[in-house]
Image: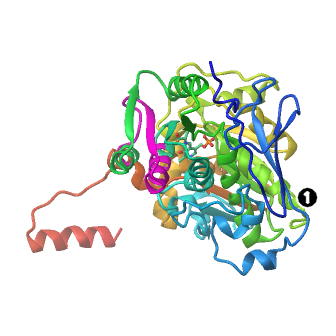
Amino acid sequence: MCGGLFGNRLLSFEFKSKRVYLKCINCNSTFNANPMLFLCPKCGGLLEVIVEVDKGISWDRFRARRFNVWRYRELLPVPSDVEIVTLGEGGTPLIPLVNMEHYGLPRSLRVYVKFEGSNPTGSFKDRGMTVAVSLAKYVGVKAAIVASTGNTAASASAYSARAKIKCIVLLPKGKVAKGKLGQAILHGAQIIEVKGSFDNALEAVMKTVKTTNKLYPLNSFNPWRLEGQKTIAYEIADELNNQLDWVIVPVGNAGNISAIWKGFRELYKLKLIEKLPKMIGVQAEGASPLVKTWSIKSNKLIPVNKPETCATAIRIGKPINWAKALKAVKESKGMFIAVSDSEIIESQKILAKFEGIDVEPAGAVGLAALLKLNRENIVDHGSNIVIVATGHALKDVDIIIKYYDVVKISADTTEVLLVIDRIISK
Ligand code: F0G
């Protein structure tokens, strides 16, 4: 064992005008900023990157730059001489919902969709990859490795291609939406299909990385990657100022909700926001280990052995970042909630049909949760709510085609006009 995950290759880098170090969320030990250190060398716990800046941070300074991940570069842990690997990620639209009365939400709510499908590879993963792959290139790794339900593979392979780094992806066989698989193929990744679930694939990646220093892991146990994803919080706060009560986030491996919460916490500490939102973590009923853990107030994860859901992106039974996510939801006074597959599909349809927003099933769980909480009278009138819609509908067209409702006729004009007449008089 040479312990790649634990950073045996001792690297450290220099930052100008900020202090960056790593802190274990389990034993609180701190370590110098080492881009090859991913888990605590003392207890094996998850690490968090701490970025401390004291001067020169203001919204005015940020807003003088283009709206994307790198607008907030002072708060990102990259050395000043890094060559950034970027595809222009972030700067995604915050779209207000306008037809909520059609699906039972009161007009007094202000609900926005943070549409992460408009990122370069169609999901929020790009925010993390621009940071992590820039660091991987900086330290000179030859190959990156990742286990994925699909989007991480699509994104990691794109950024690796750009950085001239080989990308190896482990996918649960038969469980990855075709759009995502197609992207990884197109970006030239080496695809390895494994039997079992994403959890098995991730375990294989972790074991492999522990035995070698040659591979750079791009999964969300890599705390450097999560730093890019915290910019979702920065962008929401940048646009809404302090008008924010809830942020609703789909939860799979539980990295994103932890990263977003970290982002808000940092802004609060820097006095760039005056109020912290509640974080609502959403899982699919058949893959809801954190909802189960939360509901019985357990401090240990209750895993799900055979996770199942139509939202394949979040078909995960043992989220690696469970401890970070529990802490985030607890600190924010939020909650975890599960929604059924039929609620997910219904919400996917609502977003597309009433709002023109195309999301994949995992991206629709936030609306499904909001509708459920509203039915249960848990939503306060007048609240400002952001739903993070994490991935684009085109990632998984098969699931849409299943619900395709079509009128089949000949191309005869009289028949076409007859049918059209019937449709518009409905
Ligand atoms: N939504 C989408 C569209 C995702 O692809 C994922 C995760 C999540 C939500 C959950 O985010 O894991 O940070 O809690 N997809 C990973 C992947 C697991 O391999 O693409 P999380």
Q: Secondary structure at mark 1?
A: helix
Could you say which is closer to the camera, residue 305 or residue 238? Answer: 238
Q: Is residue 183 left or right of residue 321?
A: left
Q: In the rendered image of this protein, does residue 423 appear above or below residue 254?
A: below
Residue at 60%, 37% (x, y): give it.
252
Q: Is residue 135 left or right of residue 271?
A: left
Task: Tell me which segment is drawn in magenta.
Answer: 153-179
Q: In the rendered image of this protein, does residue 208 appear above or below residue 333?
A: above
Disc 1 crowd, CA 10 A, few/some/many (<14, 14-19, 20+)? few
**The stretch drawn in magenta includes residue 108:** no
Residue 61 in view, yes or no: yes
**The stretch drawn in magenta includes residue 156:** yes
Residue at 41%, 37% (x, y): give it.
176
> Ligand 1: which quarter?
top right
Could you say which is closer to the camera, residue 3 or residue 412? Answer: 3
Residue 87 rendering spot, x and y as whole percentages: 51, 64
Three-letter code, disc 1: Lys
Q: Which residue is mark 1?
A: 269
Residue 310 rendering spot, x and y as whole percentages: 46, 37
Tell me where residue 52 sits by quadrant: bottom right
Colour convention: rainbow
Could you say which is closer to the camera, residue 382 or residue 35? Answer: 35
Residue 12 rendering spot, x and y as whole percentages: 74, 45
Residue at 41%, 33% (x, y): give it.
175
Could you say which is closer to the camera, residue 267 or residue 41? Answer: 41
Q: In the rendered image of this protein, does residue 206 appear above or below residue 250?
A: above
